Image (spheres, rainbow, N blue to C red):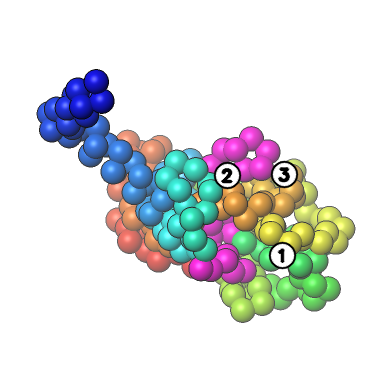
Amino acid sequence: MMNGLKKRIAEFASGWVGSLVIAFLVATSIKSAIADWYVVPTGSMKPTIIEGDRIFVNKLSYDLKVPYTTQHISSWNNPERGDIVVFYSPKDKKRLVKRVIGLPGDSISMENNRLYINGKEISYEQAALPPGLQDTISESSRLGVFREELPGFTHDIMVTYDQPAIRSFSSVHVPVGYYFMMGDNRDNSADSRYFGFVDRNLILGRATTIVMSLNRDHYYKPRWDRFFNKLN
C-alpha cells in the first residue's frame, strides 16, 4: 500500500498540475522568506515613500525565517535606527512600513513633534518638499518638511499643522526585544504612538528600494523619476 501511495505522489509530481504546484510553492516560499515587494497604499511615510510606490523588501537583511511563518531559523543582524522596515502591526497584524526610531533599551519622548532619544533633543532643519510630491498633497494642507538628525542617521520628515495627531508624549522605555516605529509623515501615521512597541519577531525585512511608482489618481501613470530610487 505504501508503494502505491509513493507511486501516486510521483505521478502527481511529474504531471503538469504537480509542476505548477511545486513552482507555486517555490515562488511563494521565496516571497515569504527571501525577498518580496510591497505596494504602499497610504502616505504615512511621506516624503520618503508616497502612495503608489512599489518597494523592494529584503527579508534576509536580519534573519532567515521558516517560510509562511515568523519563526526564525537563523539571525545575523538586528534593525538599526533609521532603517525602514516592513512588519506586522501588533494591534491587528496588518502589514505596515515604518522607520525604526527607538532601539531596545532606548528612552523615547516627543514634544511638539520634536523627538528626544535617551534624553537628547534631536536636531531639525527646514527642508524643501521633494520634486514629484505635489500631486499627492492637498492644496489646502499646511505642511512643513524638516531634516531630522537621528543619532547616526539623517532623513526628511513631514508635518501637517492642521491634522489632528499625537505630537507630544512622555518618555517611554523600549523593552528588550522590541522597537519603536514611526512614520516619516508624522501627523498622519498610525505607528508606535498608537499601537505600542513592535516585537522583533514581527519584523519581516528591510525596505531598500522603490522599484517602481504608479500614480493611481492619474490612470496609474508611471512616475519615472521614482523608479529604482534607493530608500534613505
32 and 115: which is toward the camera: 32
Residue at 52%, 63% in the rendered image: 75
Residue with the most extreme right position: 170
Return the residue at label 1: 104
Q: Which residues are magenta?
A: 76-99
Q: Where 132 sits versus 146, above or below?
A: above
Q: Nearer the viewer, residue 109 or 46?
A: 109
Disc tally is 3
Task: Quickly name the residue at label 2.
Answer: 88
**Circle 2 or circle 3, nearest the eye:** 2
The numbered mark at residue 195 is 3
Q: Can residue 63 be seen in the rendering of this structure? A: yes
Structural crowding at the residue carrying mark 3, measured as other residues with C-alpha within 10 Å and reported as few (<14), some (14–19) or many (≥20): some
The type of residue carrying mark 1 is Pro
Residue 89 on the magenta segment: yes
Residue 90 location, x and y as percent? 66, 42
Vertical relation: 83 (above or below) 40: below
Point out the tag, 2 or 3, that comes first from the N-terminus.
Answer: 2
Sequence-first tag of 1 and 3: 1
Q: Quadrant of residue 78?
A: bottom right
Q: Residue 125 at x, y = what percent?
A: 65, 74
